């Protein structure tokens, strides 16, 4: 059966994906289909085509002699050779220490948002009590921090701990409490973020230069990927640090932000995909970067009046 529009086609492909399995040798086979869902032969072949593309992508990643990756907020750089991590350039422990403590801000906002939503008040109250205990432990872990930032981290964590403890004890709901509390400690939070950012910048710049010095030949063409969440590409400190070594012109060709890559192995997979698409673009269109934009991009440019990139957020 052929479907009259792309939406129905994609939905049918989803049905096929639910009943297809791919063994290690790469040949697709049909799994039992207990619901007897209709399988569109076009969609089925489409999955097989993409599977062959996937095999090529995997082989390219395993054949790539050199790449480098970092995970945002770590300051570390991993050397990737033939699809595997062969060396890690470490970051100062201070970066991970600050990150581990200051994620308390994220956790407190999340618990507070759930409290405002009021969907599961008993569970949220228990979570708030546990959060308060965790923040109290984090306060104890500030003893070895540099004097430059220790008081600022304590200021932020103390405010969060006091707030969470009140939530855990059933304090009446105040929709403005979290934002007002954060506003009162924002100078300290900004100071902590500034110190963490500078440490991360310096670590990436230093480690990437060391990586380049150790691989002078392969360095000229290898990719450096920044693994991170989907909405953190704007003003990335890792990208800025890498530009100091690679140059601004490397952005978008050798210096890439890898969206929704939350681990180094996920980054390795995305590097392989970038290589496969670069090869595909060259072989099909004579342009190695053609597949690094939307395949239907010429239509988009025609309608939008020029090329564009839908950046997230707004510049400060």
Image: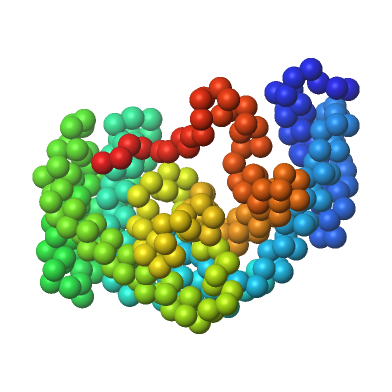
Side of 163 relative to 256 (left or right): left
Residue under the point 61% across and 37% down: 294
Q: Residue at x 36, y 58 (%)?
A: 240
Q: In the displayed structure, would residue 133 be above or below residue 77?
A: above
Q: Position of residue 3 (x, y in %)?
A: 81, 21
Relative horizontal placement of residue 188, taking residue 280 as reference (left or right): left
Q: Looking at the image, which is closer to me, 215 or 40?
A: 215
Q: Position of residue 227 (x, y in %)?
A: 49, 57
Q: Residue furthest bottom?
A: 214
Relative depth, front residue between 158 and 40: 40
Q: Nearer the viewer, residue 108 or 196?
A: 196
Task: Name the quadrant containing residue 93.
Answer: bottom left
The total number of labels drawn is 0
Please state the horizontal and vertical placement of residue 259, each as a whole percent of the image: 51, 49
Q: Is residue 302 visible?
A: yes
Q: Identify the residue at horizontal 26%, vertical 41% (top origin).
A: 316
Residue drawn at point x = 12 percent, y = 64 percent: 151
Q: How is colour applied across the structure in the image? A: rainbow
Most extreme residue toward the top, as rendered? 4
The picture places residue 62, in percent across and down from the top left corner, at 70, 68
Q: Quadrant of the N terminus?
A: top right
Residue 159 vertical position relative to residue 122 in the rendered view, above or below: below
Residue 238 seen: no
Q: Residue furthest front?
A: 286
């Amino acid at each position: 059966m052929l479907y009259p529009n792309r939406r129905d086609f994609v939905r049918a492909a989803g049905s096929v994906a639910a009943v297809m399995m791919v063994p290690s040798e790469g040949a697709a086979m049909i799994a039992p289909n207990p619901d007897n869902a209709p399988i569109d032969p076009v969609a089925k072949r489409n999955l097989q085509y993409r599977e062959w593309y996937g095999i090529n992508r995997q082989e390219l990643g395993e054949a790539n002699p050199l790449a480098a990756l970092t995970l945002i907020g770590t300051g570390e750089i991993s050397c990737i050779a033939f699809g595997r991590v062969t060396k890690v350039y470490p970051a100062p422990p201070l970066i991970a220490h600050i990150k581990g403590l200051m994620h308390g801000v994220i956790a407190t906002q999340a618990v507070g948002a759930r409290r405002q939503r009021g969907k599961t008040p008993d569970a949220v109250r228990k979570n708030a009590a546990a959060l308060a205990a965790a923040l109290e432990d984090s306060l104890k872990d500030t003893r070895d921090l540099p004097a430059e930032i220790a008081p600022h981290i304590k200021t932020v964590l103390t405010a969060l701990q006091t707030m969470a403890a009140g939530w855990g004890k059933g304090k009446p709901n105040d929709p403005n409490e979290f934002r007002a509390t954060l506003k009162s400690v924002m100078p300290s939070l900004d100071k902590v973020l500034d110190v963490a950012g500078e440490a991360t910048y310096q670590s990436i710049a230093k480690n990437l230069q060391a990586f380049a010095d150790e691989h002078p030949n392969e360095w000229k063409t290898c990719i450096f990927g920044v693994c991170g969440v989907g909405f953190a590409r704007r003003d990335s400190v890792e990208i800025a640090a890498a530009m100091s070594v690679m140059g601004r012109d490397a952005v978008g060709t050798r210096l890439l932000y890898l969206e929704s890559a939350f681990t180094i192995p996920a980054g390795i997979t995305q590097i392989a995909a970038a290589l496969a698409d670069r090869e595909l673009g060259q072989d099909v269109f004579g342009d190695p970067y053609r597949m690094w934009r939307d395949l239907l991009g010429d239509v988009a440019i025609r309608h939008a009046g020029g090329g564009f990139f839908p950046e997230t957020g707004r510049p400060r």
